[in-house]
Amino acid sequence: MPVDRVDGPAKVTGAARYTAEIVLPDLAYATIVGATIPSGRIRRIDTGRALAAGGVLAVLTHEDLPRVAEPPHLLPSLVGAAAPGESFFPMQDDAVHYAGQPVAVVVADSLERAQHAASLVRVDYARTPAVTTLDEGRDSAYEPPTLFGGLMPARMSRGDVDAGLADADVRVDVSYHFAANHHNAIETSATTADWDGDRLTLYDSTMGIRATQLTVAHLLGLHVSDVRVVTHFVGGGFGSKAMTWPHVTLAAMAARQVGRPVRLALTRPQAFTSTGHREEQEQAMSLGAKRDGTLIALRHHKLSLASPFDDWAEPATATTTQVYACPNTEGVHRLVTGNTMTPTFTRGPGESVGVFVLETAMDQLAYELGVDPVELRLRCHAETDPRGNPWSSDGLAECLRVAASSFGWARRDPRPRMRREGDWLIGTGMAAAAYPVAFIMPTQRARARIYAGGDAVVQTGTQEFGTGVTTVMTQVAADGLGLPMEAVRFEAGDTDLPNTSAAVGSSGAMMVSAAVHNAATALRDQLVAMAVADSGSPLHGAEPSDVEVHDGRMRLRSRPEVGETYGEVMGRHHLEDAEALGSWTPPPPDTPHGLLTFGAQFAEVAVDPEFGLVRVRRLGGAFAPGRVLNPKTARSQLIGGMLWGMGQALLEGNRMDPRQGRWSATSLGDYLVPVNADAPDVTIDLIEVDDEVVGPLGAKGVGEIGQVGVAAAIANAVFHATGRRIRELPMTAELVMDPP
Amino acid sequence: MDLEISVAVSADSRAASRGPGSAPAALTVNGATYLVAVEPRVSLLDTLREHLDLTGTKKGCDQGTCGACTVWVDGRRVLSCLTLALSCEGHDVTTIEGLSDGAGLHPMQKAFIKHDAFQCGYCTPGQIMSAVALIAEGNAGTDADIAEYMSGNICRCAAYPNIRAAIREVRDATA
């Protein structure tokens, strides 16, 4: 049901408080001094002038910061354990591994005084040679045994790709370079740390309060029960707040040092070097097909610039080797060790780049075969996953047909560079989209409590960073309890509440709704059972399954006039409230089902070939995310994802300056993200598909699928407009303009 | 574009002799006058957030590039991160907290909720302060105008089409 956001009034009036807005008495301000070199040692660090500056409470360096209790080990936060973003903690010795790595933390009684004092810290470095680009490290590339904190193989293969390619009637080979991407949530990450003796409260802008709690407890050697993490509003995440980065623990250490609550908010430039990024990468794909379009070989290789600490790259080949039926596939990830922090999840992790490569290669194949690109996808789509398991739910074919129809695809002349309007060449393109459903989280829990007056509170430890979870879970809880939405308050954002995993990988709608639904229906069932067993109830003796709840009143399905309210049965039992816990344990990862969410993307662009300008004139997408819990918020998330895909295609990229070993862009003036004038109107079609595998409500989530495939649709449209394939993202003007 | 850095100079003759330590200043925000003590280097944004506990005005970049800190000074939209607090003495500052006349939400606030013109909500106060000013400026005539004159306010959740819909609705209702 489309419902307005329940946190709307707080957000439009400015009443919503984000992490850096929590007021605590005697608050002090911390700021980080980041290394200005990419590799080397600190010869000397002079804190004298900073310490003498007005209002300064402490200047911490590797010489006096306490050692962490145990070194961090990267693990994705969805797993539900400690989840440091990199297997490294700074300021433990004099080594510098990447530019921006914290080398000092300054604490003062005001933000301005902390920032000024930070500028007075003098660091003497002994710089050593660094690798900050793929080109510099290409010769030392290696194939790691596993990726992703050890959770995924770096190589996947099936059949014989060489034989398949040799056997093909038609072969397509593509390769691409991708500049690094940064999340740039408008709220930079911030943490406020407040100690009470040995107990620590952290206000943290995070997509996973439990991940923050476990990580900080682990690093500081605290009991987990002594760390509480609170976050009520988070100003966007997109992956940057999915892991717990060093600044969070540094804030806690600084607060302990000065004996006051401390706030540490990253500046915008620091955000480029403190919360991970999507790594610089190259991908290559070879497709082999029969004349009729049947795929017989698919090879997908990825080369990434990783950190000195972790074999981390977004896995990009698991989805591309599943969407289409193909007997011979190979996916390989290789890494170059570079002087950057460990890269991390960025919206549509892995798939938004991997599927770009697949879907531009498929477009090229369609041209080679003379088959319509939509028709080729329909022909090639796999009926099962590669193990032969049926999809938990599919919908790709319907998405392709519906989106093609909404977009008006049938009228398209496939020949490139045929449509011109004044100075502009017009092109259209499309792509399929797919994103995995990941079952790697532990049991999820929620609690529901109802009061005798008929009002309820439902709680779980998830967090609201714009997904609409507060609104959707209010709906789910109200539905489960049989109450109007106004009677239900949903509370989240506190580790004192029942545990859920970090909301990443589009898992929030699925796992949180499952736990909330189960808590709400457990409480409903408890009260229905009480009524049917109570000789004073009009429902006495009824079968519980014959009882439904509407507007807080339990009644017989067959005779709605027979019934009573929750409050009436509770009153006879002298209960002021009743409560139930609900939990949901995901199926095992080897569940016999194919697990992907599908969609289809269409784009129309106008290209000025003399200036290389690309304007996206319209975007249309259709998506099959299982059941849609709130079409209003789902649509918004999908629009946002599609416009992210537009940014990925045309605007977003950062390059290392290899001389300095630093990012060339560290502001929103230099790292371009879509603004209002870039954003066309977007059409969304929602295709509901039944899914009995992904939880009791059958919701697969919409956080990532909107972004997947958009960049490919745009690149294919640019080809249709200009007749040229651009082999880099972002497709900046100098790449798009006609060669002289 | 009317988005510009405030260059208002205080009429107060003490301005020249104040600083570098904290200096007393009288700021009129949302119709109320506040006496604050701030160093001359302190921005209007940090004064609002850290001294007056008016945290509805957001800090997204502190570099004048994102628009999250948009407020009005004498009715014109300015970036409060690039405006010094002391330069606002003698001028009227309006923030998101002062947008409504007290009788419920401002029509633009209602329209943002109705059209789901935000997700995380962090850029929203700045978007709304720009959106209301945009109509007053006469820069909301067409969708292209709205898109152009709202491009100083970045929404990373990319609610842009919904933001345009909200502004259209308020424009048409007040035309």
Image (spheres, rainbow, N blue to C red):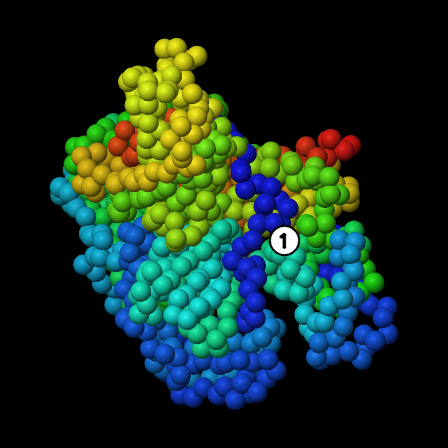
Task: Categorize mark 1 by other alpha carbons within 10 Å: few (<14), some (14-19), many (20+).
Answer: many
Q: Is residue A328 left or right of residue B159?
A: left
Numbered marks: total: 1
Seen in the picture, residue A459 relative to B51 is either above or below; the reply is above
Chain of the residue on which disc 1 is drawn: B
As shown in the figure, which amino acid type bears the numbered disc 1?
Gly
Where does residue A687 sit, x and y in percent of width and height? 40, 26
Visible in this render: residue B143?
Answer: no
Residue A334 shows in this picture:
yes
Most extreme residue toward the top, as rendered? A559
Q: Choose top left, top right, bottom left or bottom right for residue A606.
A: top right
**Residue under the image location 41 percent in, 65 percent down:** A200
Q: Is residue A34 above or below residue A279?
A: below
Of residues A308 and A251, the one nearer the viewer is A251
Q: Which residue occupies the foreground of this view, A240 or A456? A: A456
| Residue designated by label 1 | B56
Name which residue lies at 48% across and 88% down.
A46
Comparing B53 with A654, the one in front is B53
User: For the residue labelled by badge 1, is the local secondary structure a helix, a strand or a loop?
Assistant: loop
Q: Left or right: where does residue A22 sit relative to residue A702?
A: right
Residue B43 position by quadrant: bottom right
A712 sits to left or right of A88:
right
Residue at (42, 52) in percent of width and height: A494
The vertical placement of A468 against A83, above or below, is above
Question: Residue A596 location in percent, x, y?
Answer: 29, 36
Residue at the image point whose x is 46% and y is 59% from the top: A204
A253 versus B146 height, above or below? below
Q: Position of residue A268 (x, y in %)?
A: 53, 63
Q: Position of residue A587 (x, y in %)?
A: 22, 39
